Amino acid sequence: MKSIRLAHFLLLRPLILLQYASVSRQAIAQKILTSTSVLAITFLVAGLSSGDTLHAQDFYLHNGDRLTFYGDSITAQRFYTRDIQDFVATRYPTLQVTYHNAGVPGDKVTGGYVGDAAARVARDVKPWDPTVLTVMLGMNDGDYVPPDPKIFADYQEGYEKLITMLRATAPRARITLIENTPYDEITHGTEFAGFMTTTEQNAKATPALGQRERLPVVEAYSPVKELLEHAKAADPSFASLLVPDRIHPSEPLHWVMAESVMKAWHIDPVVSEVTLSAASQAVMHSLRTTVSGMQASGGALGWDQLDEALPLPFNFENALMNFVLKNSDLASCDQEMLKVEDLQPGAYQLTIDKTDVGTFSEAQLSRGINLALLKTPMWDQAREYDGALERRSELEQADFVIFAETNLKDKADASRILREGEAVFEQKVQEALRISKHHYTLAPLNQTIAPNP
Protein backbone atom coordinates (compact mmCIF):
# COMPACT_ATOMS: atom_id res chain seq x y z
CA MET A 1 0.00 0.00 0.00
CA LYS A 2 2.85 2.37 0.75
CA SER A 3 4.18 2.08 -2.83
CA ILE A 4 0.70 2.71 -4.23
CA ARG A 5 0.28 5.86 -2.10
CA LEU A 6 3.73 7.05 -3.17
CA ALA A 7 2.93 6.53 -6.84
CA HIS A 8 -0.39 8.36 -6.41
CA PHE A 9 1.37 11.31 -4.73
CA LEU A 10 3.91 11.60 -7.52
CA LEU A 11 1.19 11.57 -10.13
CA LEU A 12 -0.67 14.42 -8.47
CA ARG A 13 2.24 16.68 -7.60
CA PRO A 14 3.15 19.35 -10.16
CA LEU A 15 6.22 18.39 -12.09
CA ILE A 16 9.03 20.81 -11.39
CA LEU A 17 9.94 21.29 -15.00
CA LEU A 18 6.43 22.29 -16.03
CA GLN A 19 7.13 25.76 -14.70
CA TYR A 20 8.84 26.27 -18.04
CA ALA A 21 5.99 24.81 -20.06
CA SER A 22 3.61 27.64 -20.62
CA VAL A 23 3.06 31.34 -20.52
CA SER A 24 0.35 33.00 -18.42
CA ARG A 25 -2.95 33.19 -20.23
CA GLN A 26 -3.30 36.81 -19.18
CA ALA A 27 -0.02 37.73 -20.88
CA ILE A 28 -1.00 35.89 -24.04
CA ALA A 29 -4.53 37.27 -24.08
CA GLN A 30 -3.19 40.82 -24.17
CA LYS A 31 -1.24 40.20 -27.34
CA ILE A 32 -2.60 40.46 -30.88
CA LEU A 33 -0.66 38.72 -33.57
CA THR A 34 -0.14 41.13 -36.40
CA SER A 35 3.00 39.80 -38.01
CA THR A 36 2.41 38.33 -41.47
CA SER A 37 5.98 37.61 -42.42
CA VAL A 38 7.37 34.10 -42.39
CA LEU A 39 10.97 33.38 -41.54
CA ALA A 40 12.67 30.84 -43.77
CA ILE A 41 15.02 29.07 -41.40
CA THR A 42 17.77 26.97 -42.86
CA PHE A 43 18.56 23.72 -41.10
CA LEU A 44 22.00 22.29 -41.76
CA VAL A 45 22.84 18.79 -40.65
CA ALA A 46 26.29 17.24 -40.65
CA GLY A 47 26.54 14.75 -43.49
CA LEU A 48 23.40 16.00 -45.28
CA SER A 49 23.46 18.30 -48.29
CA SER A 50 20.81 20.90 -49.08
CA GLY A 51 19.85 18.87 -52.14
CA ASP A 52 18.75 15.82 -50.16
CA THR A 53 15.14 14.86 -50.90
CA LEU A 54 12.81 13.96 -48.06
CA HIS A 55 11.10 10.67 -48.88
CA ALA A 56 9.36 8.29 -46.52
CA GLN A 57 11.57 5.42 -47.58
CA ASP A 58 14.61 7.43 -46.49
CA PHE A 59 13.31 8.02 -42.97
CA TYR A 60 15.96 7.48 -40.32
CA LEU A 61 13.85 5.47 -37.89
CA HIS A 62 12.97 1.85 -38.64
CA ASN A 63 10.22 -0.45 -37.50
CA GLY A 64 11.14 -1.85 -34.09
CA ASP A 65 13.58 0.93 -33.18
CA ARG A 66 14.02 1.86 -29.51
CA LEU A 67 14.88 5.55 -29.16
CA THR A 68 16.43 7.03 -26.02
CA PHE A 69 16.76 10.80 -25.57
CA TYR A 70 19.81 11.63 -23.41
CA GLY A 71 20.26 15.15 -22.11
CA ASP A 72 19.80 17.79 -19.43
CA SER A 73 16.74 19.72 -18.19
CA ILE A 74 15.82 20.85 -21.72
CA THR A 75 15.40 17.18 -22.62
CA ALA A 76 13.75 16.53 -19.24
CA GLN A 77 11.11 19.13 -20.11
CA ARG A 78 9.75 16.39 -22.36
CA PHE A 79 8.63 18.79 -25.06
CA TYR A 80 10.89 18.41 -28.10
CA THR A 81 11.05 14.71 -27.32
CA ARG A 82 7.24 14.45 -27.32
CA ASP A 83 7.12 16.57 -30.46
CA ILE A 84 9.44 14.10 -32.17
CA GLN A 85 7.10 11.29 -31.15
CA ASP A 86 4.18 13.31 -32.52
CA PHE A 87 6.01 13.83 -35.79
CA VAL A 88 6.83 10.14 -36.20
CA ALA A 89 3.50 8.70 -35.10
CA THR A 90 1.24 11.07 -37.02
CA ARG A 91 3.32 10.86 -40.20
CA TYR A 92 3.91 7.09 -40.06
CA PRO A 93 1.07 5.63 -37.93
CA THR A 94 2.05 2.01 -38.57
CA LEU A 95 5.73 2.49 -37.69
CA GLN A 96 6.43 0.83 -34.37
CA VAL A 97 9.01 2.78 -32.34
CA THR A 98 9.39 2.89 -28.55
CA TYR A 99 10.75 5.89 -26.68
CA HIS A 100 12.56 6.58 -23.43
CA ASN A 101 13.45 9.98 -21.99
CA ALA A 102 16.78 10.03 -20.15
CA GLY A 103 16.94 13.77 -19.53
CA VAL A 104 18.12 14.96 -16.10
CA PRO A 105 17.91 18.58 -14.91
CA GLY A 106 21.30 20.20 -14.39
CA ASP A 107 23.20 17.47 -16.17
CA LYS A 108 26.55 17.97 -17.89
CA VAL A 109 28.53 15.61 -20.09
CA THR A 110 30.11 14.38 -16.84
CA GLY A 111 26.76 13.76 -15.16
CA GLY A 112 24.98 15.59 -12.37
CA TYR A 113 23.00 15.35 -9.17
CA VAL A 114 21.70 11.81 -9.76
CA GLY A 115 25.04 10.31 -10.69
CA ASP A 116 28.12 10.75 -12.81
CA ALA A 117 28.06 9.92 -16.50
CA ALA A 118 28.93 6.26 -15.91
CA ALA A 119 26.10 5.85 -13.40
CA ARG A 120 23.70 7.74 -15.67
CA VAL A 121 24.48 5.57 -18.68
CA ALA A 122 24.20 2.36 -16.65
CA ARG A 123 20.87 3.32 -15.07
CA ASP A 124 19.18 5.49 -17.70
CA VAL A 125 20.39 3.97 -20.99
CA LYS A 126 21.50 0.35 -20.65
CA PRO A 127 18.20 -1.18 -19.40
CA TRP A 128 16.39 0.13 -22.49
CA ASP A 129 18.86 -1.32 -24.99
CA PRO A 130 18.36 1.53 -27.47
CA THR A 131 18.88 1.13 -31.18
CA VAL A 132 18.81 4.92 -31.57
CA LEU A 133 20.27 7.54 -29.21
CA THR A 134 20.10 11.31 -29.32
CA VAL A 135 22.39 13.38 -27.10
CA MET A 136 21.72 17.04 -26.35
CA LEU A 137 24.06 18.65 -23.81
CA GLY A 138 26.09 21.83 -23.51
CA MET A 139 23.90 24.38 -21.71
CA ASN A 140 25.14 23.59 -18.20
CA ASP A 141 28.65 22.70 -19.35
CA GLY A 142 29.57 26.37 -19.74
CA ASP A 143 29.13 26.99 -16.00
CA TYR A 144 27.12 30.15 -16.75
CA VAL A 145 30.20 32.31 -17.33
CA PRO A 146 31.70 33.92 -20.45
CA PRO A 147 33.86 31.61 -22.60
CA ASP A 148 36.63 30.02 -20.55
CA PRO A 149 39.31 27.86 -22.25
CA LYS A 150 39.68 25.45 -19.34
CA ILE A 151 35.92 24.91 -18.96
CA PHE A 152 35.57 24.42 -22.72
CA ALA A 153 38.42 21.89 -22.85
CA ASP A 154 36.87 19.91 -19.98
CA TYR A 155 33.53 19.96 -21.81
CA GLN A 156 35.06 18.58 -25.01
CA GLU A 157 37.00 15.88 -23.19
CA GLY A 158 33.94 14.90 -21.15
CA TYR A 159 31.75 14.71 -24.25
CA GLU A 160 34.21 12.36 -25.95
CA LYS A 161 34.28 10.13 -22.86
CA LEU A 162 30.49 10.11 -22.71
CA ILE A 163 30.25 9.01 -26.34
CA THR A 164 32.72 6.21 -25.63
CA MET A 165 30.55 5.05 -22.70
CA LEU A 166 27.36 5.21 -24.74
CA ARG A 167 28.92 3.18 -27.53
CA ALA A 168 30.13 0.55 -25.09
CA THR A 169 26.76 0.36 -23.35
CA ALA A 170 24.61 0.44 -26.50
CA PRO A 171 26.85 -0.90 -29.28
CA ARG A 172 23.94 -1.29 -31.72
CA ALA A 173 22.65 2.25 -31.25
CA ARG A 174 22.77 4.82 -34.03
CA ILE A 175 23.80 8.01 -32.22
CA THR A 176 22.79 11.53 -33.26
CA LEU A 177 24.25 14.59 -31.53
CA ILE A 178 21.98 17.63 -31.20
CA GLU A 179 23.47 21.06 -30.65
CA ASN A 180 22.50 22.84 -27.44
CA THR A 181 20.16 25.82 -27.72
CA PRO A 182 21.14 29.42 -26.88
CA TYR A 183 21.10 31.13 -23.54
CA ASP A 184 18.78 33.93 -24.59
CA GLU A 185 20.37 37.36 -24.32
CA ILE A 186 18.45 38.50 -27.42
CA THR A 187 14.87 39.06 -26.33
CA HIS A 188 15.39 40.34 -22.78
CA GLY A 189 18.06 41.19 -20.19
CA THR A 190 20.66 38.76 -18.97
CA GLU A 191 21.42 37.25 -15.60
CA PHE A 192 24.77 35.83 -16.72
CA ALA A 193 26.38 38.39 -18.99
CA GLY A 194 28.31 36.85 -21.85
CA PHE A 195 26.98 33.36 -21.32
CA MET A 196 25.16 33.32 -24.65
CA THR A 197 28.56 33.45 -26.33
CA THR A 198 29.57 30.39 -24.32
CA THR A 199 26.50 28.44 -25.38
CA GLU A 200 27.20 29.38 -28.99
CA GLN A 201 30.80 28.21 -28.63
CA ASN A 202 29.61 24.86 -27.25
CA ALA A 203 27.00 24.44 -29.99
CA LYS A 204 29.38 25.33 -32.81
CA ALA A 205 31.93 22.83 -31.51
CA THR A 206 29.45 19.97 -31.86
CA PRO A 207 29.83 19.46 -35.64
CA ALA A 208 33.61 19.11 -35.25
CA LEU A 209 33.03 16.61 -32.45
CA GLY A 210 30.62 14.71 -34.67
CA GLN A 211 33.18 14.64 -37.44
CA ARG A 212 35.86 13.27 -35.10
CA GLU A 213 33.47 10.66 -33.74
CA ARG A 214 31.86 9.94 -37.14
CA LEU A 215 28.41 10.88 -35.85
CA PRO A 216 25.67 12.99 -37.47
CA VAL A 217 24.93 16.35 -35.85
CA VAL A 218 21.65 18.26 -35.91
CA GLU A 219 21.98 22.03 -35.95
CA ALA A 220 19.54 23.29 -33.30
CA TYR A 221 21.32 26.43 -32.11
CA SER A 222 21.00 28.59 -35.22
CA PRO A 223 17.29 27.87 -35.93
CA VAL A 224 16.39 28.90 -32.38
CA LYS A 225 18.67 31.94 -32.41
CA GLU A 226 17.34 33.11 -35.78
CA LEU A 227 13.76 32.71 -34.62
CA LEU A 228 14.51 34.74 -31.47
CA GLU A 229 16.02 37.52 -33.58
CA HIS A 230 13.13 37.52 -36.03
CA ALA A 231 10.56 37.35 -33.24
CA LYS A 232 12.14 40.31 -31.44
CA ALA A 233 11.81 42.39 -34.59
CA ALA A 234 8.20 41.25 -35.09
CA ASP A 235 6.98 41.67 -31.51
CA PRO A 236 9.54 42.21 -28.70
CA SER A 237 7.16 41.50 -25.81
CA PHE A 238 5.95 38.27 -27.34
CA ALA A 239 9.51 37.26 -28.27
CA SER A 240 10.54 37.42 -24.61
CA LEU A 241 8.09 34.62 -23.86
CA LEU A 242 9.86 32.15 -26.14
CA VAL A 243 12.60 31.40 -23.59
CA PRO A 244 11.05 32.82 -20.44
CA ASP A 245 13.97 32.07 -18.10
CA ARG A 246 16.62 32.52 -20.84
CA ILE A 247 17.56 28.80 -20.52
CA HIS A 248 14.52 26.59 -21.09
CA PRO A 249 12.64 27.05 -24.37
CA SER A 250 8.89 27.40 -24.08
CA GLU A 251 6.74 24.51 -25.23
CA PRO A 252 5.97 26.07 -28.67
CA LEU A 253 9.67 26.74 -29.32
CA HIS A 254 10.44 23.06 -28.79
CA TRP A 255 8.56 22.36 -32.03
CA VAL A 256 11.32 24.21 -33.90
CA MET A 257 13.94 22.02 -32.22
CA ALA A 258 11.99 18.88 -33.08
CA GLU A 259 11.64 20.06 -36.67
CA SER A 260 15.42 20.33 -36.92
CA VAL A 261 15.76 16.68 -35.93
CA MET A 262 12.96 15.58 -38.23
CA LYS A 263 14.43 17.35 -41.24
CA ALA A 264 17.77 15.74 -40.49
CA TRP A 265 16.12 12.34 -40.30
CA HIS A 266 14.29 12.87 -43.62
CA ILE A 267 10.71 13.08 -42.38
CA ASP A 268 8.20 13.18 -45.21
CA PRO A 269 6.76 16.72 -45.07
CA VAL A 270 3.51 15.60 -46.71
CA VAL A 271 0.50 14.51 -44.68
CA SER A 272 -1.59 14.29 -47.85
CA GLU A 273 -2.02 16.08 -51.18
CA VAL A 274 -5.21 16.21 -53.24
CA THR A 275 -6.02 18.15 -56.41
CA LEU A 276 -9.57 17.99 -57.74
CA SER A 277 -11.22 19.37 -60.87
CA ALA A 278 -14.65 20.81 -60.26
CA ALA A 279 -15.35 20.91 -63.99
CA SER A 280 -14.63 17.25 -64.70
CA GLN A 281 -15.38 15.99 -61.16
CA ALA A 282 -12.10 14.12 -61.33
CA VAL A 283 -9.15 13.53 -59.04
CA MET A 284 -6.21 15.14 -60.82
CA HIS A 285 -3.58 14.26 -58.21
CA SER A 286 -3.38 12.46 -54.89
CA LEU A 287 -0.47 11.60 -52.61
CA ARG A 288 -0.51 9.63 -49.36
CA THR A 289 -4.30 9.36 -49.51
CA THR A 290 -7.13 7.56 -51.30
CA VAL A 291 -9.96 9.67 -52.74
CA SER A 292 -13.24 8.01 -53.62
CA GLY A 293 -16.95 8.65 -54.18
CA MET A 294 -16.53 12.05 -55.79
CA GLN A 295 -19.82 13.59 -56.88
CA ALA A 296 -21.39 16.96 -57.66
CA SER A 297 -24.78 18.40 -56.84
CA GLY A 298 -25.92 21.93 -57.64
CA GLY A 299 -22.45 23.41 -57.68
CA ALA A 300 -21.28 21.55 -54.57
CA LEU A 301 -18.67 18.82 -54.52
CA GLY A 302 -18.49 15.85 -52.19
CA TRP A 303 -15.91 13.11 -51.79
CA ASP A 304 -14.42 10.65 -49.31
CA GLN A 305 -10.78 10.69 -48.31
CA LEU A 306 -8.71 8.11 -46.42
CA ASP A 307 -5.31 9.57 -45.57
CA GLU A 308 -2.19 7.66 -44.60
CA ALA A 309 -1.17 10.21 -41.97
CA LEU A 310 -2.43 12.85 -39.55
CA PRO A 311 -1.48 16.51 -39.18
CA LEU A 312 0.71 17.61 -36.28
CA PRO A 313 -1.18 18.38 -33.05
CA PHE A 314 -0.24 22.06 -32.75
CA ASN A 315 -2.20 23.78 -29.99
CA PHE A 316 -4.02 26.48 -31.94
CA GLU A 317 -5.54 27.74 -28.68
CA ASN A 318 -2.07 28.88 -27.57
CA ALA A 319 -1.26 32.35 -28.95
CA LEU A 320 2.47 31.76 -28.53
CA MET A 321 2.19 28.61 -30.65
CA ASN A 322 0.47 30.63 -33.36
CA PHE A 323 3.21 33.24 -33.10
CA VAL A 324 5.86 30.56 -33.65
CA LEU A 325 3.95 29.21 -36.64
CA LYS A 326 3.78 32.70 -38.16
CA ASN A 327 7.47 33.35 -37.65
CA SER A 328 9.00 30.00 -38.55
CA ASP A 329 8.80 27.47 -41.36
CA LEU A 330 7.18 24.75 -39.23
CA ALA A 331 4.29 24.48 -41.68
CA SER A 332 6.70 23.35 -44.39
CA CYS A 333 6.95 20.02 -42.55
CA ASP A 334 3.19 19.69 -42.08
CA GLN A 335 1.62 19.80 -45.53
CA GLU A 336 -1.99 18.59 -45.78
CA MET A 337 -2.82 20.24 -49.08
CA LEU A 338 -6.20 20.51 -50.81
CA LYS A 339 -6.51 22.14 -54.23
CA VAL A 340 -9.73 22.46 -56.20
CA GLU A 341 -9.48 23.77 -59.76
CA ASP A 342 -12.08 25.10 -62.22
CA LEU A 343 -14.44 26.48 -59.60
CA GLN A 344 -16.83 29.28 -60.46
CA PRO A 345 -15.94 32.64 -58.85
CA GLY A 346 -17.25 33.03 -55.33
CA ALA A 347 -16.87 31.87 -51.76
CA TYR A 348 -17.08 28.22 -50.76
CA GLN A 349 -17.68 26.54 -47.42
CA LEU A 350 -15.61 23.45 -46.63
CA THR A 351 -17.00 20.90 -44.21
CA ILE A 352 -15.41 17.63 -43.16
CA ASP A 353 -17.70 15.09 -41.49
CA LYS A 354 -20.24 17.93 -41.11
CA THR A 355 -17.69 20.02 -39.19
CA ASP A 356 -17.31 23.54 -40.57
CA VAL A 357 -13.63 23.96 -41.45
CA GLY A 358 -13.74 27.39 -43.10
CA THR A 359 -14.78 29.57 -46.00
CA PHE A 360 -12.44 30.09 -48.94
CA SER A 361 -12.47 31.88 -52.27
CA GLU A 362 -12.11 30.01 -55.54
CA ALA A 363 -8.66 31.64 -55.88
CA GLN A 364 -7.53 30.31 -52.49
CA LEU A 365 -8.78 26.83 -53.34
CA SER A 366 -7.08 26.93 -56.72
CA ARG A 367 -3.76 27.84 -55.07
CA GLY A 368 -4.30 25.27 -52.36
CA ILE A 369 -5.09 25.41 -48.65
CA ASN A 370 -3.08 23.66 -45.96
CA LEU A 371 -5.61 21.78 -43.84
CA ALA A 372 -2.88 21.01 -41.28
CA LEU A 373 -3.14 24.61 -40.06
CA LEU A 374 -6.90 24.38 -39.49
CA LYS A 375 -9.10 22.72 -36.90
CA THR A 376 -10.33 19.60 -38.67
CA PRO A 377 -11.49 16.17 -37.48
CA MET A 378 -8.01 14.93 -38.40
CA TRP A 379 -6.44 17.58 -36.17
CA ASP A 380 -8.82 16.57 -33.37
CA GLN A 381 -7.57 13.00 -33.68
CA ALA A 382 -3.94 14.12 -33.56
CA ARG A 383 -4.68 16.17 -30.44
CA GLU A 384 -6.26 13.13 -28.83
CA TYR A 385 -3.10 11.16 -29.58
CA ASP A 386 -0.89 13.89 -28.13
CA GLY A 387 -3.03 14.04 -24.98
CA ALA A 388 -2.54 10.35 -24.31
CA LEU A 389 1.17 10.75 -25.04
CA GLU A 390 1.41 13.60 -22.53
CA ARG A 391 -0.14 11.46 -19.80
CA ARG A 392 2.27 8.63 -20.52
CA SER A 393 5.14 11.14 -20.35
CA GLU A 394 3.99 12.32 -16.91
CA LEU A 395 4.04 8.74 -15.66
CA GLU A 396 7.54 8.26 -17.06
CA GLN A 397 8.69 11.40 -15.23
CA ALA A 398 7.21 10.16 -11.96
CA ASP A 399 8.92 6.81 -12.48
CA PHE A 400 12.27 8.57 -12.89
CA VAL A 401 11.74 10.59 -9.70
CA ILE A 402 11.08 7.44 -7.71
CA PHE A 403 13.85 5.37 -9.21
CA ALA A 404 16.65 7.94 -9.36
CA GLU A 405 15.88 10.34 -6.53
CA THR A 406 14.73 8.12 -3.65
CA ASN A 407 16.15 5.29 -1.61
CA LEU A 408 12.80 3.74 -0.71
CA LYS A 409 12.93 0.02 -0.11
CA ASP A 410 9.77 -0.57 -2.10
CA LYS A 411 10.49 1.84 -4.94
CA ALA A 412 10.68 -1.07 -7.35
CA ASP A 413 6.99 -1.77 -6.65
CA ALA A 414 6.05 1.87 -7.16
CA SER A 415 8.06 1.92 -10.37
CA ARG A 416 6.27 -1.19 -11.57
CA ILE A 417 2.87 0.41 -10.95
CA LEU A 418 3.84 3.52 -12.87
CA ARG A 419 5.19 1.50 -15.79
CA GLU A 420 1.95 -0.45 -15.89
CA GLY A 421 0.22 2.91 -16.12
CA GLU A 422 2.53 3.86 -18.98
CA ALA A 423 1.44 0.71 -20.78
CA VAL A 424 -2.22 1.71 -20.40
CA PHE A 425 -1.60 5.05 -22.05
CA GLU A 426 0.61 3.42 -24.66
CA GLN A 427 -2.44 1.39 -25.66
CA LYS A 428 -4.54 4.57 -25.81
CA VAL A 429 -1.86 6.12 -27.98
CA GLN A 430 -2.09 3.25 -30.44
CA GLU A 431 -5.88 3.44 -30.52
CA ALA A 432 -5.71 7.17 -31.29
CA LEU A 433 -3.67 6.42 -34.43
CA ARG A 434 -6.38 4.43 -36.20
CA ILE A 435 -7.17 6.62 -39.18
CA SER A 436 -10.70 6.62 -40.55
CA LYS A 437 -12.24 7.77 -43.82
CA HIS A 438 -13.61 11.32 -43.81
CA HIS A 439 -16.33 12.87 -45.94
CA TYR A 440 -15.61 16.27 -47.49
CA THR A 441 -18.17 18.73 -48.85
CA LEU A 442 -17.33 21.94 -50.69
CA ALA A 443 -20.38 24.07 -51.37
CA PRO A 444 -20.98 27.61 -52.64
CA LEU A 445 -21.61 29.83 -49.66
CA ASN A 446 -25.25 30.43 -50.62
CA GLN A 447 -26.00 26.71 -50.92
CA THR A 448 -27.36 24.85 -47.92
CA ILE A 449 -27.81 21.34 -49.31
CA ALA A 450 -24.60 19.35 -49.61
CA PRO A 451 -24.20 16.20 -51.69
CA ASN A 452 -25.01 12.99 -49.87
CA PRO A 453 -22.09 10.94 -48.61
Image: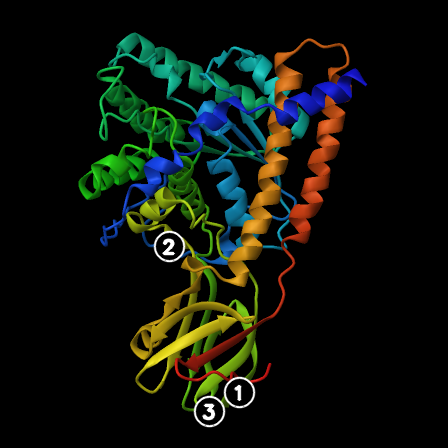
Mark seen at residue 91: none
In the rendering, at what x and y percent does residue 321 appear?
A: 38, 45
Chain-order first, disc 2 or disc 3? 3
Q: Kindly check if marks 3 and 1 are in contact, taking CB atoms under 8 A apart as contact.
A: no
Image quadrant containing the C terminus: bottom right
CA distance separating discs 3 and 1 = 10 Å
Question: In the displayed structure, would residue 144 be above or below residue 205?
Answer: above
SS label for mark 2: helix
Q: What residue type is labelled 1?
A: Gln
Mark seen at residue 331: 2
Which of the pair 360/148 is nearer the observer? 360
Image quadrant containing the N terminus: top right
Q: Residue at x 42, y 75 (%)?
A: 349
**Tag 1 residue:** 295
CA distance separating discs 2 and 3 = 34 Å
In the rendering, at what x and y percent does residue 36 appear?
A: 23, 54
